[in-house]
Amino acid sequence: MIDSQNRMNQAIMTAHDYMSQAKNNINKMFGDGYAKAHPELVAAFMQVCVMDYMATAFEDRIEMLCNSLDAIAEALTSQEN
């Protein structure tokens, strides 16, 4: 289990990576310095990264839950027969 200090450190590293990627991608798309001049675009880019990560993580967890429920249902069905 990850303790709170490690979670905070991981969050800082993730935010740094998202910001770095935002800066690089925005400048590549719109020209050098564009990210610095448009911090709102950097923030929006970072929010999209977080939302996409969360959606994928939730999808994985839901799939695991569905598989577990299927296994339980199968076990209960086999006990009835």
Image (tube, helix red, strand yellow):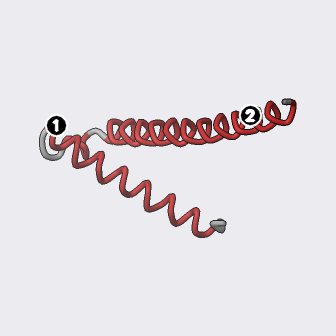
Q: Amino acid at mark 2?
A: Glu
Identify residue for label 1.
29
Camera-side residue of 6 and 36: 6
Name the side, left or right, on which 77 lies relative to 54: right
Q: Quadrant of the N terminus?
A: bottom right
Give the SS element for disc 1: helix
* Quarter of the rendering containing residue 6: bottom right
* Quarter of the rendering containing residue 45: top left
Q: What residue is rendered at 40% in x and 42% in y?
A: 46
Q: What residue is rendered at 36% in x and 56% in y?
A: 17
Name the side, left or right, on which 37 lies relative to 3: left
Camera-side residue of 49 and 60: 60
Residue 9 location (% of width, % of height): 52, 66
Q: Amino acid at mark 1?
A: Met
Name the side, left or right, on which 20 lies relative to 52: left
Q: Quadrant of the C terminus?
A: top right
